[in-house]
Amino acid sequence: MQDVIIVGGSFAGLTAAMQLGRARRKVTVFDTGLNRNRYADHAHNIFGHDGTPPGELLAAARQQVQAYPTVQLVPAKAQLVSGGPDDFRVTTTDGETVSGRRLILSYGIVDDFPAIPGFAQCWGKTVIHCPFCHGYEVAGTRWGLVYSSPMSLHGAVLYANWTDDITLFLDGHAIIDEERHKLEKRGVRLVDGKLRTISHDAGRIASVTMDDGTEIALEALYAHPRNRPSADLHEQLELDMGDTPTGTMIKAGDMQATSRPGIYVAGDLATGMHSVTFASNTGSLAAMGALQSMLV
Ligand SMILES: Cc1cc2nc3c(=O)[nH]c(=O)nc-3n(C[C@H](O)[C@H](O)[C@H](O)COP(=O)(O)OP(=O)(O)OC[C@H]3O[C@@H](n4cnc5c(N)ncnc54)[C@H](O)[C@@H]3O)c2cc1C
């Protein structure tokens, strides 16, 4: 019997595993190696590691976590979950079942790319989700933002921090005249119609073409595709869910506790605010929550 089973061993899951390993707890981490930022060459805005490739960060973390003899990293996909506190059971697609007293879900989210030619090829390079992560490198250039939710109106204002050349692509969405005038007054260009293609050279964007044939040159395009949890264990466990501007999350209370006892959630799966630092933070909290609950 393990103390804690962690599903998803990336920034959130490995932070939790480290904390529990140092507390001498028996931990199994299942992971399929598909961290969300694997498309980006470098990860930014990370304490002490600004600009390090994401794969390097994770490889170092795995090595360090494995130094704790009570932690076991298993490269397998968790498929089924059952049971309750002190007897959760997680079964992988290889048919292995592990039992644990507590569960931490940190399996992240998947971005569903829109069917715009060029989008997938540019994702993480010049089609970007977050200016704090990847805005500095293209500051002062021509930026576009694809409307995805009312949050995009806030984005168009925020991005003025990095550049004064911003085009908001409404991509088939309607916004009220008041919002339109507010943005235009701030110098944001608004483009109606839908995006048809993204022209690029090996992921470096050159321009976007609208469905009426208009071509607009850009150096960076910000986009927030719809996303969904990477696995369905939360459905099997019937956990309470909440909405984010672009998807869903597992609701978390104090110390990342979910709506069911003994189950904790961390990382992108637990919030609409997505970053390595937030993932690490909630991973650490989830580990402490799980540990404390075993001491009472
Ligand atoms: C293109 C891009 C660039 C980004 N750049 C930055 C940046 O520069 N700085 C920054 O702070 N943030 C950045 N982010 C955000 C950052 O990637 C996420 O916030 C972070 O990866 C979340 O960590 P996580 O541990 O919650 O999930 P993830 O890193 O997505 O990891 C989830 C893990 O769970 C595994 N998994 C999924 N299902 C299962 C299953 N059933 N069984 C076992 N394992 C499973 C996956 O394979 C994966 O390893 C970027 C995001 C994107 C999309």
Image (spheres, rainbow, N blue to C red):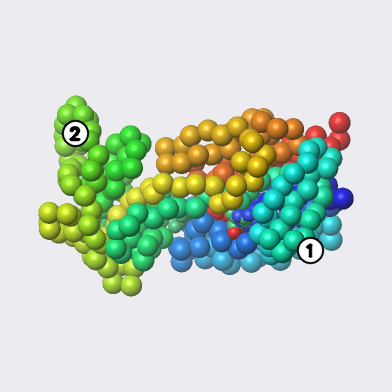
Residue type at mark 2: give it. Answer: Arg
Quadrant position of residue 174:
top left
Disc 2 to disc 1, C-alpha distance:
55 Å
Indicate the secondary structure of the residue bearing disc 1.
Answer: loop
Judging by the rendered image, the residue that carries numbered circle 1 is: 67
Indicate the secondary structure of the residue bearing disc 2.
Answer: helix
Quick check: can you spot residue 35?
yes
Residue 277, image x, y percentages: 56, 48
User: Mark 2 touching mark 1, by CB under 8 A?
Assistant: no
Question: What is the count of numbered marks?
Answer: 2
Is residue 150 rendered to the left or right of residue 178?
A: right
Vertical side of 277 occupied by 206: above or below: below
Vertical side of 38 occupied by 145: above or below: above
- Residue at screen point 39% across, 55% down: 113
Residue 288, image x, y percentages: 74, 40
- Residue at screen point 42% across, 53% down: 112
What crowding class fits label 2: few (fewer than 14 Cα within 10 Å), some (14-19), or many (20 or more)? some
Residue 97, image x, y percentages: 79, 56
Is residue 295 rendered to the left or right of residue 271?
A: right
- Comparing labels 2 and 1, the label whose residue is closer to the camera: 2
Judging by the rendered image, the residue that carries numbered circle 2 is: 180
